[in-house]
Amino acid sequence: MNNNLAHLHPYPFAKMAQLLANSEPARNYTEIKLGIGEPKHTPPAFVLDVLQENLDKISRYPTTNGSFELRQTIAHWLEKRFFLRHVDPNTEVLPVMGTREAIFSFVQAVVNTNKSNPTVVMPNPFYQIYEGATILAQATPYFIPCTPDNNFKGSYRAVPKEIWEQTQLLFICSPNNPTGSIMSLDDWEDLIRLSDKYDFVIASDECYSELYFNEPPIGLLQACTTFGRDDFKNCVVFHSLSKRSNLPGLRSGFIAGDAAILQPYLQYRTYQGCAMPIPHQLASIAAWQDEKHVAHNRALYQEKFALWMDELGELLELTMPEAGFYFWVKVPTQFDNDDEVFVKALYEQANIHALAGRYLSREVNGKNPGKGYVRIALVASVAESREAIERIKELLTAHLR
């Protein structure tokens, strides 16, 4: 057994279950789940129709790199969405069984343990797969605190030179989970220059890229094209249909970018055995080719954000994220600025699930940047959102007395 398994942290939701193990939810209320970032909007019917119509193809083995039609569709989507000059569907795109699986396996394939102290740099707070994959690849995670002082994007220029010299992989999440911050073109330029100087791979997790309010966020490959880096050297991005199209159970996404990285990774995946079923591929083609359902999905989130800001913005001191579907909420003072205390109160007094921020972060130099924050996912319906808002108003008012 891999000895590194002992170094894995429990998943955030396992920690939440432990925290609430001896608590009882408010029985006078129905349950409202705002803790897990699982989309609850209705999946596009036409995608489900394609899936249903092609179930007979489940009898065929899929290829690891998916069909050319799927790769070509993804390449065209990338070109249009991020203003790219050309994406080669044969070498620069690889469909995957959801980005969670792909992120994990990508780290295993990229990290070279023959080099001294292989390091993977990541934001803090972060998506826990970054850390777990790093530990199991026998590399060292290095955390960049994302705080109000740096607009929740991290101060990468403050990373010591000796860390960059050991870095093999840098994870960026833009739009960020959980803070909702996005990378600017200047931010991308800084990181690409660092990558060139120290020769590490930049992996950009862009699964929330289509959930924005005004202008669509700039992606890493878009930045590459802007700087004339059309080979996407040392740069890869991860995208998914889970948030964009409300299809988390389809387990469909892709990785795209530097062909020199993706081709060895494809060979790795051939042995790993992860290949998207053909019905899922055909349904994915339909989803990537349509933008109307994405715009409708985006509008629903915009409506809910506006509702929360109007009703709770001042009382809960909410700050609008730049994109995504999370509020990163500073815990009110009446709950001792303690995220665990606040999520327990939400559960016990309002039957609302939220996620303690400290479970998404690690302590660095005595400080956990997630401590004192709570992540609220606006995944529930508009009606449930209204109900949750009323319950939270009552809870906050009661604790002011």
Image (tube, grey):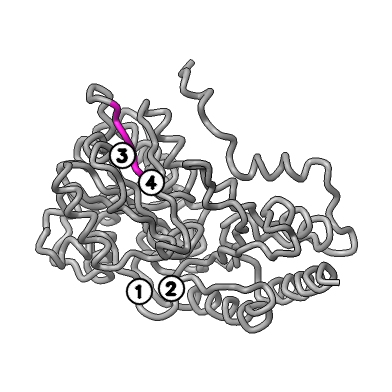
Residue contact between numbered discs 3 and 2, judged by CB atoms under 8 Å = no
Q: Which mark is residue 122?
A: 4
Give how far apart the Cα atoms at labels 3 and 2 are. Answer: 32 Å
Give how far apart the Cα atoms at labels 1 and 4 are. Answer: 23 Å
Residue type, mark 4 in image: Met
Figure check: 157 above or below 316: above
Q: Secondary structure at mark 3?
A: loop
Q: Which mark is residue 46?
A: none
Give how far apart the Cα atoms at labels 3 and 4 are. Answer: 28 Å
Q: Secondary structure at mark 1?
A: loop
Determine the residue positioned at 26% across, 56% down: 69
Callout in the foreground (3, 4):
4
Give the extent of the magenta segment: 117-122
Drawn side of residue 11 relative to residue 332, left or right: left
Classed neighbour count for the residue bearing mark 3: other residues with Cα under 10 Å, few (<14), some (14–19), many (≥20): many
Callout in the foreground (3, 2):
2
Q: Secondary structure at mark 4?
A: strand
Drawn side of residue 315 relative to residue 362, left or right: right
Where does label 1 land, which residue? 216
Pick the front one: 183 or 161: 161
Pick the front one: 260 or 339: 339
Where does label 3 land, which residue? 64
